[in-house]
Image (spheres, grey):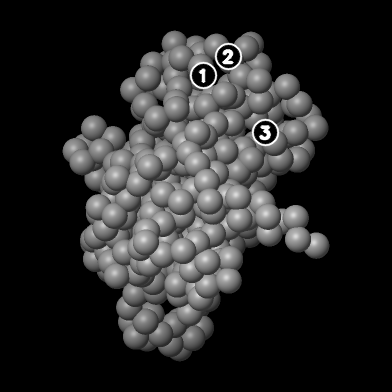
Amino acid sequence: MDCKQDVHDLALLGGRAAFDNELYVGRPNLPGRAAFLKRAGDILDRAWLTNNGTYVQQLEKMLAERTRVKHCIPMANGTIALEVAIRALKLSGEVIVPSFTFIATAHALQWLNITPVFCDVGPRTHNLDPARVEELITPRTTGIIGVHLWGRCCDVEGLTAVARKHGLHLLFDAAHALGCSYQGRPVGGLGEAEVFSFHATKFVNTFEGGALATNNDTLAGVVRLMKNFGFSGYDEVRSVGTNGKMNEFSAAMGVTGLEHFEELIAHNRRNYDAYRRELIDVPGLSLLTYDEDEGGNFQYIVLEVASEAPLSRDDLMRILHGERVIARRYFYPGCHQMEPYRTLYPEAGERLPSTRRLAASVLVLPTGTQIGEEDIERICAVIRFAMTRGVEVSARLRAMERVP
Ligand SMILES: Cc1ncc(COP(=O)(O)O)c(C=O)c1O
């Protein structure tokens, strides 16, 4: 598809879809199938399915080595790891978080009857802005949860300074950031604790899963108890707890994924470079960049569609869906616009101009091992075609909407 073609060539407007099968954001990477199946067999042979089995221990060791933290405790998912971290650190009252994040960051607080106070992010960093954070501190504030969005680290130095000055806890939602670094320090050891997600959509997955990383032995001890109902031995319960344990099959999947860690990142990197090359001169679009001096996992391909572009973000998404490229709006419309927060804090959006702008402009494109450079060239040909003919494409879409 090139710009000489007619807009009719777009699948949504009567043409043939560019792809026979759907490509979608977050399709799982499944490296090392034979090794995983062998491990699954081992688990069944040993009949040890959960409760700190061999693979959970191996996964913890591999994660701790990779992130250079003392403890990287595998858990059932990232959300429960956040909840346990929040409870173990005894957060209460109000905690400052971004609204431009996955809803789990806010829910983990609300679930524990703590008020998530939504703070704006930097327009370019997409991460918490320490100056805005400081403005939101009240006598009820007990902590800050920064999110290393897209695997790009927060201003850890700035947030640490604010936290120290006001005696607040600082914790990071590092769900996107395994393998990333801040000033050369691997994510995992920043703040008092960091939480990873290994959900199926993450570049290393354990089906469902997460981990809590910390260098604090006392905190790690509390977390180990809490994620196992508070059990410290067969018949002894020392604290209130929950079931946050990871099972052996998930851990075996994680071990297998980590064996392919470098290769997965290299694949993501090649995909990212291909998108960059193809989209560099497309009007109205900018592709999120990653700091070349830091470790990155390149698992998100994040486009921003300018508000003045001839084709809107949502129309571009419709066109891509028609071509069977399932691009996604992230983190639309922002946590503050979702329940219960929209009802509880109807005014929150007023102090979140960058969040509102990003929620209206970001479009995430497929990557991972499901696609390679040739697919990306075809996806980008559709994007270039649609954007350069934006006025015409948009008019056709509006006309289609009017047809009953
Ligand atoms: C930023 C962020 N925080 C938290 C989570 C929750 O992780 P999980 O799905 O493993 O519970 C996710 C992801 O899925 C996420 O993207």
State the separation of the CA atoms marked 3 and 1.
16 Å
Q: Nearer the viewer, mark 3 or mark 2?
A: 3
Q: Which mark is residue 341?
A: none
Q: Amino acid at mark 1?
A: Val
State the residue at coordinates (32%, 78%).
32
Q: Nearer the viewer, mark 3 or mark 1?
A: 3
Number of other residues with Cα within 10 Å of mark 3, as a class: few under 14, some 14 to 19, many 20 or more: many
Q: Earlier in the sequence, mark 3 or mark 2?
A: 2
**Could you say where residue 92 lies in the image, as x and y percent from the top left?**
65, 27
**Residue 7 shown left or right of residue 1 in the figure:** right
Q: Nearer the viewer, mark 1 or mark 2?
A: 1
Q: Which mark is residue 137?
A: 2
**Residue 402 shown left or right of residue 203 in the figure:** right
State the separation of the CA atoms marked 3 and 2.
18 Å
The one of 377 and 289 positioned closer to us in this rendering = 377
**Quadrant in which the N terminus appears:** bottom left
Q: Amino acid at mark 2?
A: Ile
**Could you say where residue 395 lies in the image, as x and y percent from the top left?**
60, 50
**Could you say where residue 397 lies in the image, as x and y percent from the top left?**
63, 55
What secondary structure is found at the residue carrying circle 2? loop
State the residue at coordinates (65%, 30%).
116
Q: Which residue is mark 1?
A: 133
The image shows residue 304, relative to residue 276, as above or below, that is above
Q: Which mark is residue 336?
A: 3
